[in-house]
Image: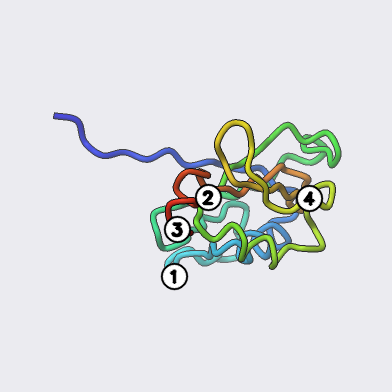
Amino acid sequence: MSSPHALTAILPCNDLDASEKFYARLGFARADGDKPTDGEDSYRILSDGKGGQLHLTEAVEGWLIRGRNPFGLYLYTEAVDDLAREFSDELVNGRGPEDTPWGMYEFALSDPDETLVRIGWPSRLRRTRQV
């Protein structure tokens, strides 16, 4: 019998505070027990309270270069339109949510380190709810 499991991204960041604030706008916050101690604050665990987690870690200086960041994340959520409104001035290429040929209703953002963050929900499920 297989047991449930999860996969969590560990995301390098140049500025943990800026990254934490960005991801808080997407609904992620530190757990009550995840508070820095004695100035040690190079790793943060964020959760959305719905099973989603994101670990932020301090990048080695000079390793993560803005504009050349190879990382990307995908947030699956029904709240695509709400989040697009929240980030309306920060949409990649100014493009809001749209249905894609691969069957997702999505849009894209860049976090403070220019990590690509796509936010979407399956188009077929969105259409079902609108009917």
Which mark is nearer the camera, 3 or 2?
A: 3
Q: Earlier in the sequence, mark 3 or mark 2?
A: 2
Numbered disc total? 4
Q: Are marks 2 and 4 in contact (CB under 8 Å)?
A: no
Residue of label 3:
131
Label 1 – label 3 distance at C-alpha: 40 Å
Which mark is nearer the camera, 2 or 4?
A: 4
Position in image of residue 88 (x %, y %) = 76, 63
Q: Nearer the viewer, residue 73 or 106?
A: 106
**Neighbour tally class for label 2: few under 14, some 14-19, many 20 plus, Cα within 10 Å:** many
Left or right of 74 in this view: 98? right
Label 3 – label 2 distance at C-alpha: 33 Å
Residue of label 1:
32
Q: Earlier in the sequence, mark 1 or mark 3?
A: 1
Label 2 – label 4 distance at C-alpha: 25 Å
- Residue type indicated by callout 3: Val
Label 4 – label 1 distance at C-alpha: 36 Å
Element under disc 2: strand
Q: Nearer the viewer, residue 58 or 6?
A: 6
- The residue located at (26%, 39%) in the rendering is 4
Residue of label 4:
95
Q: Can you say which quadrant of the picture contains the C terminus?
A: bottom left
Q: Earlier in the sequence, mark 3 or mark 4?
A: 4
Residue of label 2:
54
- The residue located at (63%, 62%) in the rendering is 83
Identify the mark at residue 61; answer none if there is no mark: none
Which mark is nearer the camera, 1 or 3?
A: 3
**Neighbour tally class for label 3: few under 14, some 14-19, many 20 plus, Cα within 10 Å:** few
- Residue type indicated by callout 1: Asp
Pick out the residue farthest to the bottom. 32
Label 3 – label 4 distance at C-alpha: 25 Å
Compared to 85, does 110 lie above or below?
above
